[in-house]
Image (cartoon, rainbow, N blue to C red):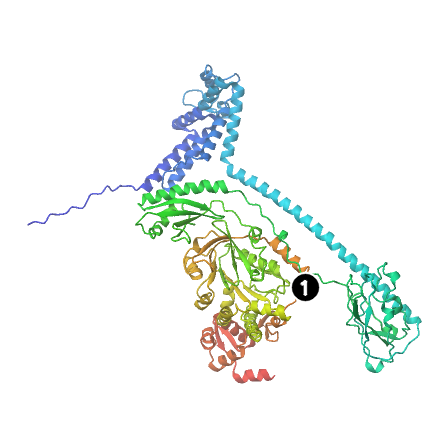
Amino acid sequence: MKEKMKSPKTRDNKILGDDVEYVLIGLMIVLLSIIGLLNKGPVGNFLTYITIYLFGAYYFILYAILLVLAFYLMFKKKVFKVKINMNLFGAILVFISLLIASSNTNSELNFNNLVQLFNEHMGSVSSGVFVIDNLSNLASTGGGFIGFTLKALLNTCVTNVGTTIIYIICMTVGLVLLFKDIIAYIVKFFVNYSYKIKERKEEKKLEEIKLSESESTPLIEKIVEENHDNEIEKVEETSTIEKEEKIPLGKPIIEELVIPTKPVNVKSFFIDDIEELPKNEVKDVKPIEVDDLVPPQEEVKEEPKSYFSDELLKPNYNNTLINEVNDIRPIEEKIPEEKKIEVVKPIIVQEKAQNIVKTRESTPKIEKKKPYQLPPFSLLKIHATEDTKYENQRIAQQRLEKINNTFSQYKIGAQVISYTIGPSVTRFNVKMNEGVRVNTLASVSNEISIALNGNKTVRIEMVVEGRDTSSIEVGNEKPTGVSFRECFEQIKDKTSDKDKLLIPLGKDIEGRVVTTSMDELPHLLVAGTTGSGKSVFVNTIISTFIMRNTPDELKLMLIDPKKVEFSKYANLPHLLCPIITDAKEGKEALKRLVQEMERRYELLSERGAAKISEYNEFAEIQGFEKMSNIVLVCDEFSDFMSEYGKEIEQSVKRLAQKARACGIYLIICTQRPSVNVITGDIKAVIPSRVGLLVPQYVDSKTILDEGGAESLLGNGDMLCRIPRHNSLVRVQGAFISGVEIVQITQFIKDQVEVKYDENFLNLVPQQTVLFHGNGERRKELDELHEECKAHVIRTRIASTSNLQSNFGIGYARADHILNCLEDEGVVKRVNGNRRIVVATSSEVDENSEN
């Protein structure tokens, strides 16, 4: 049986592909357009005549459109699709208005004389049919036959005046529709500029108020200093006249002084900063009577300058010196009736008058310590935001229909039943039909993105906490900012001790302010790339702490490798130590923080307290010093891990495991949370995470243990894994400006001077330094420098990998050690980057001895 021969299926193969066809068609259109524009030959005359006859002086616009379409066909390889929108409508209105406006005639144009007048105008450029021989009179053709016809129609209906009004209105409307985006931008610019002017005026008013308040303080200090100088002059004058008296040396006599029944308003007189005389030169001292210290009743009304009477300043002073009066304190302005206080009598000893040195710098100023005032709520600004509610609602309704159409197109039993518009994201609530698996939503995520015009911000959440629906989150067309003042207002009334560490993260999609406490976290990992809003988010946390806590209640340790992120907080009284910018200092600071943690646990154990809150309660009852909270904020954590990875990781692990009970909290920030920076051990001890925009799914998986952060919008849009929430919470972070931060910090600095903890100063010893070559570049020697030096000389191997494997250090640290050895002359480079050992142990010993 013969097998049937199977002939191949005939296919409709084209000789030329579609791309070639588009190119050829485009070339033909370009050729015809050029011929028509040049007006050469019969074909050129014909094309030019037809276009001028129809469009008059604007015939070139038709050729320009044809050239654009031709080039689009040639390069895009597809037909241009005209979208019917307001821009196209505006362009048509402008074009028609130009045709009508340019169709001018000497007499009024109407349907009766339309053909006659138009032929007269065409005759100025054409001597016959399909012949154009005088383009210099092209303007007389106006808008061509189309323009003349439209103007004749309007003149017949509404006269010439009405025609003018109509084409002016059409021209204006068309231009507005055509350039609406530019006009909106200009209007928005001027509106924002007016807001800025108002803000500047308010700032000037605040500055004037501050200046008026601060002017009174220097005047008071000047008056006090002048009065004090006058009394010092009296002392010097009497010292040259009175005779020298010898009184026995003894301890200050303390007696009870009866205060008059009438309240006395007096100022204190301090005698301080005077050189002490050696004991062998001290002669007899005579005690001063207590009665001399009481000011007379007549002088009470006149507000005496000193607590002591003038008679006290007139004893025989020759060659005498006032010595050590340290326990004299000012008497309160309001003194109860018949109240007794103790007064320390000063001792007057013999000395030469010229040794009395009193300057304004050494004279103590009379200051009454004011209670610490937290920064007021008025320092925070209300940032003007554009009202985008109706625009976002309109776009959300369109997106709802597109999503439902996608479900029906792919036969998925689901439907969007409602939506919620948040500050930056709209959440579409999806109800699944019975028997339809929720996972089917994930299979059409890309199709939904394409249906929404390629929107890459689509995020599908299978299960929404507290709801029986799934959700599709899409970024708003016009996001709305969240002000830090608006969020801070929600927690400003919560002033109890347990709420001191409460921080607002921002607003969720429902518009509610999401708050959490550092005591609940108790440590936080923050990850976000450039432009994600990480720095602003960290600034809101720090600003919340310093606005709700006094310097005695909370201390900050700031680590800033870039040296610019935390520069606004320099010399802040809340700082535990100066802002750390060096990796070696940061490593040592973490070690000392571990030591501080151990010291605190010893104190807790001694007092029988289990945590810092109990310890502070005991301190308030028993009267010993309270323990302040410490918050470590580390920016660019990856920079430290690259140099001292293992040492820093060990310190972070110990602090994260144990430091919560003693009031030490960690906030670690990084741009890219790779596994060599955020290791598994660190993730295990820091469960609270905040993920802002990251570049890849892997980074989101590292920081949040699931994807989603790679599709965020940036500018403060974040996913938070925090206590009290079983799933990720999407939050729009609050915004705080640099001006607000400066105002807050300056308000605090004006009240309290910075005082660092001595245990956290001098983190890096200054003697371990090495000068490169002629001393141009300064290097700090590593702790393992000598050990590595001996190892290199012994093994005769100078490579970073050798040091890494033998001493367990990173590449950057090993390379730094070899660079220092190269500067010492122990090793040198040959053949590019290869290093060899050139020194011997005996040579090194001789150099050290010399």
Find residue 503 and report its horizontal and vertical position in percent: 54, 58
Choose top left, top right, bottom left or bottom right for residue 558.
Answer: bottom right
In terms of secondary structure, where does tag 1 sit?
loop
Q: Is residue 303 visible?
A: yes
Closest to the observer, 373 or 633: 373
Q: Quadrant of the C terminus?
A: bottom right
Residue at (68, 59) in percent of width and height: 750
Residue at image point 43% right, 53% down: 711
Residue type, numbered disc 1: Glu
Q: Position of residue 398 (x, y in %)?
A: 42, 40
Instruction: Decide which of 472, 355 is in the foreground and name it.
Output: 472
Q: Position of residue 670 (x, y in %)?
A: 50, 61
Up-down relation of residue 45 to residue 723 (above or below): above
Q: In screen coordinates, is 467 left or right of 239?
A: left
Foreground: 817 or 532? 532
Furthest-left residue in view? 1
**Pointer 1 local density, CA inside 10 Å: few below 14, some 14–19, many at least 20:** few
Image spot of residue 598 (x, y percent): 55, 74
Does residue 452 appear in this view?
no
Q: Which residue is mark 1?
A: 753
Of 497 and 349, nearer the camera is 497
Answer above or below: position of 282 versus 500. below
